[in-house]
Amino acid sequence: MKNTIEQLVIIGSGPAGYTAAIYAGRAQLQPIVFEGFAAGGLPGGQLMTTTEVENYPGFAEGIQGPQLMKEMRQQAIRWGAKLVTDDVVKVDFSHRPFSIATDDLEVKTQAVIICTGATARRLHIPGEDKFWNNGISACAICDGTNPLFKDVEIAVVGGGDSAAEEALYLTKYASKVHLLVRSDRLRASKIMQQRVLNHAKIQVHWQALPIEANGDDVLQSVKIQSQAAGTITELKVGGLFYAIGHTPNTQLFQDSLDLDDKGYIKTIGKSTATNIAGVWAAGDVQDHIYRQAITAAGTGCMAALEAERWLAEIH
Ligand code: NDP
């Protein structure tokens, strides 16, 4: 690999990365995919830490997140993607061929698709690891229909649009939704604020933070610290949803690509092109609004098609 110039390198291995790899592989670009060590040592991105995925089209009965990623990975391999299970630690986009390096390997390439995703912020409270995916989640749309949350009280943490959206979504399943807001105001858009504040099933707790998650096998209650009252109370909830923002995984690209004020890679118009010709970005690393496996896969497909056309033009 060392002395040749590759056509296309894909960095990241969630739905965006593997979909880009499938399309690029079928276009005979023989992409190199740096899968990384995301999600605690496993390639595959955020879905590796999800259980049932019920909204990915084509799986009428749902599919386990890790199984879905395994299928995508196999499909990428089938079409000729070369997978490198290592973290990229350095990129050089200052001239072509671009350089992509891990601790052990440097690859030169004409084109790059970045699919490094975003990481849901966590609070790191006691009990969080134990109940993660077993009562605690960072995605109501992914996990809200789990029978664990049916007709029980649920808490959502956060005060932005995501928290408002998740709280409203969860009212369809939960008997009551407690919205825990750390300050005395919601940051969400006015319309979302009104919907939340006027909803009969949502109770807003101002200046409140979860400080401990408790239960036996599944989550049963959360300790809440009220900063206004200076009290600690136990809230009986079967679910705790974090909606306190995501951090895009763009540290590697801070000096080379245009990022927006939240650190997401800026893409041009309706394309996945970045400010550097020959570099595209797909999935959650450039999308803070939809953040779904299917939208990530969709933009991964777009990026591969755009890269294929661009490579054909420069040759
Ligand atoms: P935001 O950054 O907008 O909001 C994060 C929220 O979490 C804030 O209320 C913040 O509190 C709170 N928070 C952060 N850290 C902690 C913590 N440690 N403990 C407790 N609370 C915490 O993130 P969102 O994911 O809501 O939104 C990101 C972007 O995506 C926004 O621009 C949003 O408008 C957009 N979006 C748009 C949607 C739409 O248009 N349909 C849907 C979802 C998101 P504080 O306010 O005190 O900082």
Image (cartoon, rainbow, N blue to C red):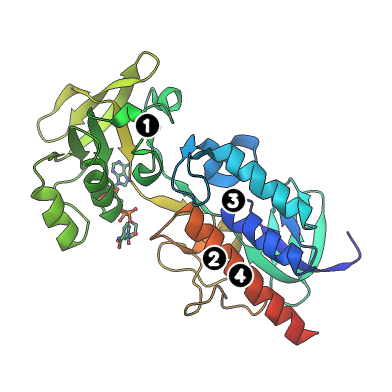
Instruction: Identify the mark at residue 299; answer none if there is no mark.
Output: 2
Whole-percent x, y for residue 289 in the image: 38, 60
Left or right of 135 in this view: 116? right
| Type of amino acid under label 3 | Gly
Earlier in the chain: of badge 3 and badge 2, it is: 3
| Type of amino acid under label 4 | Ala
Rendered image quadrant of residue 43? top right
- Distance from disc 3 to disc 4, alpha carbons, whole Å, reads 14 Å
- Distance from disc 2 to disc 1, alpha carbons, whole Å, reads 28 Å
Label 4, secondary structure: give it: helix
Are the residues flagged by discs 2 and 4 in contact, CB closer than 8 Å? yes
Quadrant of the rendering where the C terminus is positioned: bottom right
Whole-percent x, y for residue 274 in the image: 56, 74
The CB of the residue at mark 3 lies under 8 Å from ligand 1: no
Q: Residue at x 73, y 77 (%)?
A: 95
Q: Residue at x 26, y 39 (%)?
A: 156
Q: Residue at x 32, y 37 (%)?
A: 241
Label 2, secondary structure: give it: helix
Q: Nearer the viewer, residue 210 or 235?
A: 235
Whole-percent x, y for residue 79 in the image: 77, 58
Earlier in the chain: of badge 1 and badge 4, it is: 1
Where is mark 4, residue-wise? 303
Neighbourhood count class around disc 2 (C-alpha, 10 Å): few under 14, some 14–19, many 20 upward: many
Residue 94 seen from this side: no
The CB of the residue at mark 1 lies under 8 Å from ligand 1: no
